[in-house]
């Protein structure tokens, strides 16, 4: 049996009215890879991830997860995907414990597995000490941990993380990056960011997107930034 790539995106375009967010994005990600999706604001990162997660319909092109077309069978593909959107909304007045229980319900985790799945996500994401707190009491770092726990509750094969460290302080950034690295040992991960050091510290491969097109696909070590710039990326000489 030939195994399918975890992600296959081919000729993806997306227009919002007259604004063309994606102009033909194509790439594949094999199972098990941790890939950075690097680009400046407005490059099309979030749009690509929303299409992959089944929340936005492309204007044209194909997006497949494990060989299944997202637009044809979004229910099947969502089961395979854990998606952490940018600015993930949380229910502020819910206790962390209750929130995870609620999400497990929404994601259709069978009752018999629920407690095991929640316990495992809590452990992975280091949430044991805050289970009894309301979400509104949590620091931004802990809120992102809740977001990651939420994303892995149904034990997906693929994690789609949209700018997971934006707005965090330096310590929280290190913690979340370490957590992502840990999750990447058993899951395929695509992680969007506009920070080169983020892909260098977490990813084995980087795709660079600019103005709605993938313009580079390489090992992160082969990229260097121009002076002081986190967004301007030039390819190291081959
Ligand atoms: P950011 O880091 O700012 O989230 P991004 O790389 O994720 O950037 P996208 O959010 O995918 O970029 O946006 C790509 C382009 O599409 C931008 O020019 C943006 O203004 C536009 N766009 C995105 N969503 C919409 C929308 N719902 N309606 C109109 N234009 C949109």
Image (cartoon, rainbow, N blue to C red):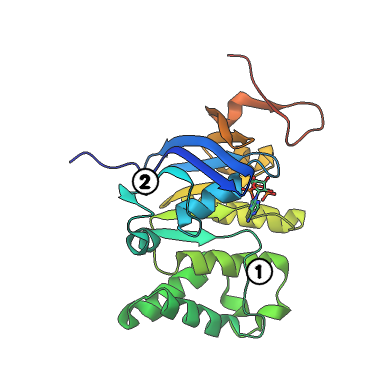
Residue on which the image places disc 1:
142
Q: Eyeballing the image, is 159 above or below 233?
A: below
Q: Residue at x 67, y 80 (%)?
A: 92
Q: Nearer the viewer, residue 39 or 22?
A: 22
In the picture, which quadrant includes the C terminus? top right
Q: Is residue 157 visible?
A: yes
Toward the left, the furthest residue is 1
How dense is the environment of label 2, judged by Cα within 10 Å: few (below 14), some, or many (20 and up)?
Answer: many
Toward the front, the furthest residue is 18
Residue 221 in percent (x, y) is at 60, 28
In the picture, which quadrant includes the N terminus? top left
Residue 119 in percent (x, y) is at 45, 75
The answer to which image quadrant residue 176 occupies is: bottom right
Q: Are marks 2 and 1 in contact (CB under 8 Å)?
A: no
Residue 2 in percent (x, y) is at 22, 38
The answer to which image quadrant residue 89 occupies is: bottom right
Q: Nearer the viewer, residue 120 or 203?
A: 203
Residue on which the image places disc 2:
6
Looking at marks 2 and 1 on the same chain, the residue that comes earlier in the sequence is marked by: 2
Residue 87 in percent (x, y) is at 66, 63
Toward the right, the furthest residue is 228
Label 2 sits on a secondary structure element that is: loop
Determine the CA span between mark 2 and mark 1: 29 Å
Q: Eyeballing the image, is 117 above or below 165?
A: below
The numbered dot on residue 115 is none
């Amino acid at each position: 049996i030939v195994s399918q790539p975890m992600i296959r995106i081919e000729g993806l375009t997306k227009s919002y009215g007259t604004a063309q967010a994606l102009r033909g994005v194509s790439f594949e990600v094999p199972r098990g890879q941790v890939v950075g999706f690097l680009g400046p604001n407005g490059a099309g990162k979030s749009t690509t991830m929303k299409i992959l997660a089944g929340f936005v319909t492309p204007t044209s092109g194909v997006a497949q997860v494990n060989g299944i077309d997202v637009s044809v069978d979004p229910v099947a593909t969502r089961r395979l995907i854990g998606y952490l959107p940018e600015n993930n909304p949380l229910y502020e007045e819910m206790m962390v414990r209750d929130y995870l229980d609620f999400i497990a319900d929404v994601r259709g985790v069978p009752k018999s597995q629920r407690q095991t799945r929640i316990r495992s996500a809590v452990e992975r994401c280091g949430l044991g000490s805050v289970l009894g707190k309301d979400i509104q009491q949590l620091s931004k770092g802990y809120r992102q941990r809740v977001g990651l726990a939420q994303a892995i509750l149904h034990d997906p094969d693929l994690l789609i993380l949209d700018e997971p460290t934006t707005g965090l302080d330096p310590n929280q950034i290190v913690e979340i990056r370490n957590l992502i690295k840990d999750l990447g040992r058993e899951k395929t991960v695509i992680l969007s960011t506009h920070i080169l050091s983020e892909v260098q510290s977490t990813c084995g491969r980087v795709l660079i997107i600019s103005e709605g097109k993938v313009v580079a696909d390489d090992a992160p070590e082969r990229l260097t930034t121009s002076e002081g710039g986190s967004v301007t990326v030039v390819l190291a000489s081959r």
